[in-house]
Image: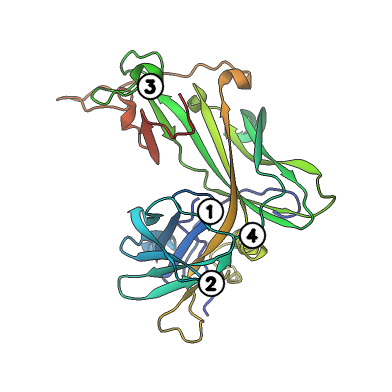
Amino acid sequence: MKTLRTLLYGFVLVGLSTCVDPYEFEFQKDTEENFVIDGYLSNEHRVHQIRVSRTTHIGDFNGVVADYVTNATVVVIDDQGAEISFEHDDAGVYKSLGPVQALPDRAYKVRVTLINGTVYESNFQTLPEAAPIESELIYELGYQDVLVNNTIQEEQGVKVSAVVEKGAENQFYRWEMNHYFIIESDAGPGFRNPQEQRGLTDTELRFCFIKDYPPQELYLLENISNTPGDSYQTEIEFIPISNKFEYVFVVEGRQLVMAEDAYRYWEDIQTLAENAGGLFDSAPFPVIGNITRVTDNPDGTVVGLGYFGVYNASVDRKFMTQASLGIDEEFAPCTVPPSPGGEPRPHQCQDCRLYEFPENYENSPPSWWGY
């Protein structure tokens, strides 16, 4: 098998000892087109998703872009032959047709059939043991040093940590972090709060509930067994203070407990990223996941990129306000730029429904976000 020089482009969002090391995905030179299949099934009863893409060159820039695969057939199959179907939603993301979940007495694999009939599959994965305690997030106001114009400056923000408990066996964790907030269109209607515009659909909206773009980072933790019952805190992320904190800011942490082989895969991806140097450096070692091409591959040597896992998930959300953080910030209002002529176009400062985020819930936030 040829050495892979691709860091998996298209993963969304994803340490050693008891440290959590964030890793931002980078894009390196590729030697050939590769298919990337990334996703998981968990015990959490919800809509799950799997991303399918292929990597291609960017002309003379020696880079890699993702060519999203939008016409594949994607299913998750259990060891008794039952299938869970996924359909394409957007940007190569396939979502289950409804809420689904992994069961503790079953094994699961993903099968992706391309439009040309080529089939890729993972091996079977089973649900690991749950964490000793469910994930709990804590937060505090803090500072970090940032480099601005060659000068180190302190930046104010929120430090988010997770409480981890020691178990009798080693545990392997990955966190998915999401951010939610309320955004205001300062030039919009004169509503004083979201409640006043509840249910409105035929007029401009001043307040919208938003899901932010997820951090492009991977948080891993290997929790070494030692004195079961002991707990400690490990920092997950630092969120700079911005106008997203004007009203309510929500941090959602999804703790995923995984098998050691899944953890080692992501750890190898992180090592590959750290070791990949310049264009003329020696090629790094290949990172093999659990995706293999089924068709025309009798010896199993042709692999795809990516990993399909089955994880034990727990979710915690923390609602933050300026009062709970002990700050009182005023942010510059958004303004509508002058129109060069003709009829002015609708602007997001007038109607918050025009803000483009992964999710703009407008007047209908998720059920857990009561208002």
Residue to which mark 4 is pinned = 128
Mark earlier in primary sequence (4, 3): 4
Amino acid carrying label 1: it is Phe
Query: Contact, CB < 8 Å: mark 3 with mark 2?
Result: no
What's under tag 4, amino acid-wise? Pro
Q: Residue at x 37, y 54 (%)?
A: 97
Name the residue carrying label 1: 25
Alpha carbon distance from label 4 to label 1: 26 Å
The quadrant of the rendering that contains the C terminus is top left
What number of labels is visible?
4
Q: Position of residue 212 (x, y in %)?
A: 46, 37
* Mark closer to the chain start, 4 or 2: 2
For marks 2 and 1, the one nearer the N-term is 1
Report which residue position mark 3 lands on. 334
The answer to which image quadrant residue 309 occupies is bottom right
Q: Amino acid at mark 2?
A: Asn
Badge 4 or badge 1: first in the primary sequence:
1
Q: Nearer the viewer, residue 10 or 310?
A: 310
Viewer-nearest of labels 4 and 3?
4
For mark 2, what is the residue? 123
The x, y position of residue 142, in whole percent, is: 67, 28
**Mark-to-mark CA distance, 4 and 2:** 15 Å
Compute the Cα span from label 3 to label 2. Answer: 51 Å
Mark 3 or mark 2, whichever is nearer to me: 2
